[in-house]
Amino acid sequence: MKNFTSVKDVEDPVALVQKALALKANPFNPDFARGKKVGLIFLNPSLRTRLSSQIAVQNLGAEAIVLDIGKDGWALEFEDGVKMNGSKAEHIKEAAGVMGQYFDVLGVRTFPELKDRELDYSEQLLNAFIKYSGLPVVSLESATLHPLQSLADWMTIAEHWDKKERPKVVLTWAPHVKALPQAVPNSFVEWMKAAPVDLTITHPEGYELAGQFAESVPVEYNQARALEGADFVYVKNWSSYHQYGQILNQDESWSFGSEQLALTNNAKVMHCLPVRRGLVIKDEILDGPNAIHLQQAKNRIYSAQAVFAELLG
Ligand code: CP
């Protein structure tokens, strides 16, 4: 594996899930990458990714150095061939080039602006870090994908499923007050297509995900019908891909509560976090026995550890 930006970068995703589960059982290996340095670069806020990545790197004996570049670094220019006489103080060529001198592996979190779909889906920022750092790069969430989250999600499903038949997994849209990226649902779909599960997506009309990810996955616009017999329900808001970045409705009948849970096969309920209680998922679910969002968050350590181990080893 050269970089970790998508399930497509992983030769054997099943083996990577097994590796992450094995690391969870036996996480501490301080000699594995002693003396190596990992840069964790954030252009946006993070709680889980930031903390779990640092713990993962420490478990491997390497040192993690975090830079909130959006807050503490110079404002970066990503366009080529511009005269930098505006507010941007440093070009990505130098910024990433310098990081290439300091680190062995780089983790980068970017976000989409949700204004220009082609620009966001080109992954301009992440690709610039890959190109100009010359380092193996781990996506800590990009404009369109969140692979460390999806690897942790797959681990969590595997831990809660010991039957031979494939579980029914439903990804359901839920309302939100802000326009959110499609990165988590895109990524979940991409990884679940490689996993031994039967995936259905449900959302109001207009929230169809990009074909490059959701193609061949059944979409059921009726949430109640989609949830019938579900073993796992992944609840997530996203903004429209086709009417790019827009909130088309905030229909609170899509919030996930006990009424929805009753339609399922006593499903485990998942969310990547942060979650808006009472709006996206009701308290009775988050505080109840079906919620496995904290296990997902814990597994973020071991998904990151498996990936950093591949790239540092
Ligand atoms: N799920 C997730 O990536 O959380 P953070 O944005 O807090 O890192």
Image (cartoon, rainbow, N blue to C red):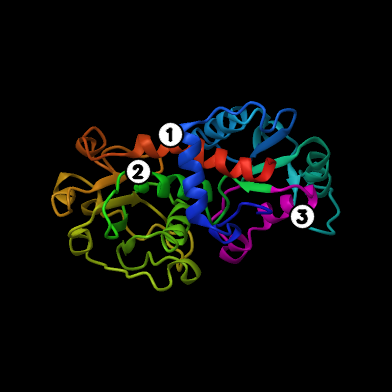
For residue 298, the mark is 1
The N terminus - image quarter:
bottom right
Res. 189 image quadrant: bottom left
Q: Going 28% across and 43% down the picture, which residue do you hit?
A: 279
Task: Give the quarter of the image for residue 284.
Answer: top left
Amino acid, disc 3? Lys
Mark 2 is surrounded, within 10 Å at the Cα level, by few (under 14), some (14 to 19) or many (20 or more) other residues, namely few
Q: Are marks 1 and 3 in contact (CB under 8 Å)?
A: no
Check if residue 133 falls in the magenta segment: yes
Q: Nearer the viewer, residue 167 or 244?
A: 167
Residue drawn at point x = 68 percent, y = 48 percent: 137
Residue in view at x 83 percent, y 40 percent: 98
Q: Earlier in the sequence, mark 2 or mark 3?
A: 3
User: How far apart in space, not on screen, are marks 2 and 3 (Cα)?
Assistant: 37 Å
- Give the extent of the magenta segment: 110-136
**Amino acid type of disc 2?**
Glu
Where 69 falls versus 247 (above or below)? above
What residue sits right under mark 2 in the picture?
159
Q: Secondary structure at mark 3?
A: helix
Q: Does the magenta segment cover residue 59?
A: no
Q: Earlier in the sequence, mark 2 or mark 1?
A: 2
* Marks 2/1: CA–CA distance: 12 Å
